[in-house]
Image: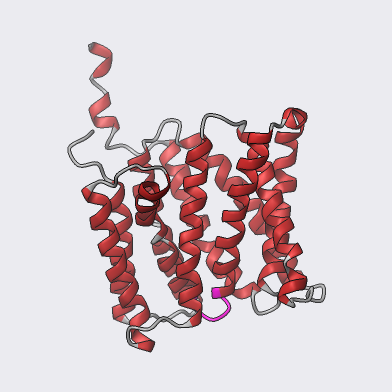
Amino acid sequence: MHGAAPETPSRLMIGRPELALIGITLLWGGTFLIVHQAMRHSGPLFFVGLRFGTAALIALPLALPVLRGVTRREWLAGTMIGCGIFTGYTLQTWGLRTIPSSTSAFITAAYVPLVPILQWIVLRRRPRLASWIGVALAFAGLLLIAAPRDGLSLGRGEALTLISTLAIALEIIFISLWAGRVDVARVTFIQLAVTSLLAFACMVPAGEAAPPINWIVMLSACGLGLMTALIQLVMNWAQRSVSATRATLIYAGEPVWAGLIGWIAGDRLPASALLGGALVVAAVIVSEIRFGTP
């Protein structure tokens, strides 16, 4: 029992894993502004294809030693997760052509309270009361974010971003569906490659032409690919010792960081939209807290 005494104060301390998660959350928040700026020079499908193609190449050295043992289940898992990533990030990137990065970040954060509802539909896991409260807070926040310009109607950018949250939430459901039954390195590479291939393949039917060689687009997409790989690596490392609830509280700062970075870059959201963003962040926190559990 003597060795158990330090545990109580340690919960109040911020160790290296928590600092690492705070760092990647700040990095994550900055991705919205990078994409928003890049959309001035590129179409969304080309950009998503280049971004995730870079991430796949970075993940390849980890997957290559075990890639020959890939199973049908892993092909299916990687493909379905990749479809979710492709849909979510393409719609989000499309939305960033017409809305500020801060607005996009706050709307995207609403995927967290949506996950329990989709788990109920897909995996038959009944949501807790906290999840329903989170959904209600997120809905109220989204109305406030969209209301300043268009009354209660969503503009095209907001609507595309809102739909993207459903795809991102489904991606998380798919990951949960196969968790523990597949090789992480193989499935990670497959899902990143599928996302990239789908984006490039859809350029022709969507009528999107490849942009002229532009260093802003190239550096942004490749930089985001590197950031995507780094974020996933740090999350997998840090969450071995940080609880899911505590990690989610840290991740809830992502739209806040994105809003701050957007404000520095010139985004000016009305007070009602800022209040809506605060409600979405509250929804993220509330929906993940398990009241009465340590």
Residue 4's place in the image compared with 156, above or below, is: above
Side (left or right) of 26 relative to 75: left
Q: Position of residue 286 (x, y in %)?
A: 26, 52
Instruction: Point out the residue furthest to the top here.
Output: 1
Counting from the top left corner in percent of width and height, residue 163 is at: 48, 67
Q: Quadrant location of the C terminus?
A: top left
Could you tell me which residue is drawn at 46 percent across and 62 percent down?
Answer: 165
Residue at image location 28% in from the left, 51% down from the top: 131
Is residue 198 visible in the rendered image? The answer is yes
Colour mode? secondary structure
Prevailing SS of the magenta stretch: loop
Q: Is residue 264 visible?
A: no
Q: Give the tally of numbered discs.
A: 0
Please name whichever residue, 287 or 220, is drawn nearer the observer in this view of the structure.
287
Position above or below: 129 against 30: above
Q: Residue at x 43, y 58 (%)?
A: 254
Determine the residue positioned at 70% across, 78% down.
41
Residue farthest right in this picture: 213
Rendered image quadrant of residue 253: bottom left
The residue lying toward the viewer, choosing from 133 and 272, is 133
Q: Position of residue 236 (x, y in %)?
A: 52, 37
Extent of the magenta region: 95-100
Q: Is residue 31 left or right of residue 114?
A: right
- Drawn side of residue 87 relative to residue 25, left or right: right
In the image, 95 versus 1, the foreground residue is 95
Relative image position of residue 145 (x, y in whole percent): 35, 76
